[in-house]
């Protein structure tokens, strides 16, 4: 196995530590609900302890080949809640030349097993609530509370990621997620473009209520910390009481959230005003204009829309003087980002797929151990979103080119859910589609043709055993038949109309 003498990820770790040590602020992060802070010295000691544990795990497997090799660019799956352990693990992996595969902390055992089979990580760092099957587990409780290390049974040698700093998961079209390779330069470019466009500085504190394993949370919170020392306030769970505590500090405070989180905050805040809160960002799902107006009236601050994609980072931002955009509008391009519209046959002139040019555009998709470039070429990415640009340079989203369901910023692939549904006894046909959800943007709806005797409760229990909570259908419809088009394909429009009538 090739070994890199100077792993590219080490530069990110060195920049992170040097930036922290050069500032007068001696904390790395604040933690809620504990109410404690992590200082720089303690953080470095924890990273060193994690590094020693990783080195002890670098041993031969049953096949007699090295299963975990530092400075090799090997992939390591990281699935963690917003805990200090997440920061320590990320720093330790970068320091030792491993490439994190960023995964949702709510994934279950079967979903983790699927990622292991698809991506062949050398090691998995998992939330302690997950009990992996087989392999070798190492409890990191004392050193990294909330995490456990797990080496899956080794059948194939671990994957190596060429030149990557992280691999992000994106929705696939076959029920399996794709891995998007992002280099150190692309991560830093994304962080620079976001912080410069939004005026985020090292003086700010960043509320970490959105998952750090998602592209939105990773680049806004973790990469702002790495780039310039913007400190996070880590929330283990996005509970209303913790949100209120996080934004009640002296400030300046930046709160990147989702429409669902802002609705929670609005309901729990009452008439309170938060003097330290200076910037609220919303992404992950469309922000209803009605929610934005109500939030501004109650809290006294606008929610500014942010739009991005895992493959190309930040794209647009609401720079309007007063804040608040009409439904469907996502603002103007970030500094360093240019947009154009790729025409689509049959669409109105000026409307088509959104093409992004940016230094933050990722290298491409992970294809075995090589990089498969995106459509559009180097530094460009053609999104799955349909849109148009108006006379003021604002981007409007008009639809999706694929079927991904956007549940409060978390993308659900209908094919994955359909595969689970079809494995349930008595289910003859299953089609999954999205339905509107005021709180989450969209929700998962399952339309089933079944034999007699199958209940909604049985369906939901089976789904909960194999899917993360946000992927479990919130609505189950039993139908006599799935409508088909003239070509024999599922008529999704007719099915959606049928659901709407129920």
Image (spheres, rainbow, N blue to C red):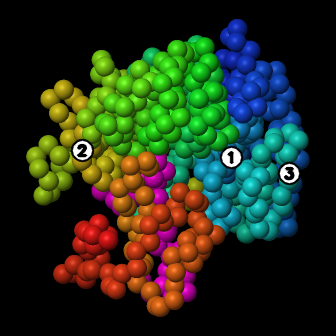
Q: Nearer the viewer, residue 13 or 79?
A: 79
The label on residue 208 is none
For the residues marked 3 and 2, what is the alpha-carbon distance in whole angstroms? 48 Å
Picture residue at 24% right of the left edge, 44% below the top: 387
Q: Position of residue 325 (x, y in %)?
A: 28, 31
Task: Give the residue number, with chain letter if any, for mark 1.
Answer: 80
Q: Position of residue 410 (x, y in %)?
A: 49, 50
Instruction: Confirm or deny contact between disc 3 and disc 2 (CB under 8 A).
Output: no
Q: Is residue 79 left or right of residue 450?
A: right
Which region shows up in magenta?
A: 401-429
Is residue 49 covered in magenta?
A: no
Q: Nearer the viewer, residue 305 or 155?
A: 305
Give the mark, 2 or 1, whose residue is nearer the N terminus: 1
Other residues around mark 3 within 10 Å, as few (<14) / some (14–19) / many (≥20): some
Q: Nearer the viewer, residue 102 or 265?
A: 265
For the residues marked 2 and 1, what is the alpha-carbon distance in whole angstroms? 34 Å
For the residues marked 3 and 1, what is the alpha-carbon distance in whole angstroms? 14 Å
């Amino acid at each position: 196995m090739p070994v890199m003498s100077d792993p590219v990820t080490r530069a990110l770790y060195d920049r992170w530590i040097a930036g922290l040590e050069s500032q007068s602020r001696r904390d790395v992060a604040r933690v809620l609900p504990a109410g404690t802070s992590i200082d720089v010295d303690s953080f470095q000691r924890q990273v060193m302890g994690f590094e020693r544990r990783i080195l002890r795990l670098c041993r031969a497997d049953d096949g007699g080949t090295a299963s975990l090799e530092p400075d090799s660019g090997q992939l390591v799956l990281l699935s963690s809640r917003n805990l200090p352990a997440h920061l320590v693990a990320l720093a330790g992996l970068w320091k030792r030349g491993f490439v994190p595969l960023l995964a949702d902390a709510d994934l279950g055992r079967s979903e983790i097993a699927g990622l292991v089979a698809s991506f062949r990580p050398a090691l998995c760092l998992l939330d302690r609530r997950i009990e992996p099957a087989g392999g070798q587990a190492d409890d990191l409780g004392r050193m990294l509370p909330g995490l456990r290390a797990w080496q899956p049974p080794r059948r194939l040698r671990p994957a190596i990621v060429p030149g990557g700093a992280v691999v992000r998961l994106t929705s696939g079209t076959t029920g399996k997620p794709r891995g998007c390779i992002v280099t150190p330069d692309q991560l830093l470019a994304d962080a620079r473009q976001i912080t410069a466009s939004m005026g985020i500085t090292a003086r700010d504190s960043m509320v970490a209520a959105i998952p750090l394993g998602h592209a939105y949370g990773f680049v806004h919170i973790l990469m702002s910390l790495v780039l310039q020392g913007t400190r996070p306030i880590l929330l283990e769970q996005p509970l209303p009481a913790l949100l209120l505590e996080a934004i009640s500090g002296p400030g300046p405070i930046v709160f990147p959230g989702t429409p669902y989180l802002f609705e929670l905050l609005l309901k729990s805040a009452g008439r309170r005003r938060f003097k330290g809160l200076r910037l609220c960002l919303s992404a992950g799902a469309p922000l209803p204009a009605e929610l934005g107006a109500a939030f501004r009236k109650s809290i006294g601050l606008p929610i500014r829309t942010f739009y991005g994609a895992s493959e190309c980072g930040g794209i647009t931002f609401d720079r309007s003087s007063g804040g608040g955009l009409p439904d469907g509008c996502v603002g103007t391009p970030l500094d360093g980002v240019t947009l154009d519209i790729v025409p689509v046959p049959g669409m109105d002139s000026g409307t088509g797929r959104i093409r992004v040019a940016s230094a933050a555009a990722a290298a491409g998709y992970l294809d075995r151990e090589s990089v498969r470039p995106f459509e559009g070429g180097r530094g460009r990415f053609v999104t799955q979103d349909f849109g148009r640009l108006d006379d003021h340079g604002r981007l409007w989203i008009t639809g999706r080119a694929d079927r991904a369901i956007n549940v409060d910023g978390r993308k659900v692939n209908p094919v994955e859910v359909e595969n689970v549904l079809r494995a349930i006894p008595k289910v003859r046909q299953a089609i999954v589609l999205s339905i509107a959800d005021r709180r989450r943007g969209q929700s998962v709806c399952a339309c089933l043709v079944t034999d007699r005797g199958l209940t909604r409760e049985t369906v939901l229990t089976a789904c909960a055993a194999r899917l993360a909570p946000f992927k479990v259908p919130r609505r189950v419809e039993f139908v006599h038949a799935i409508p088909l088009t003239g070509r024999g394909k599922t008529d999704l429009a007719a099915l959606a109309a049928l659901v709407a009538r129920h």
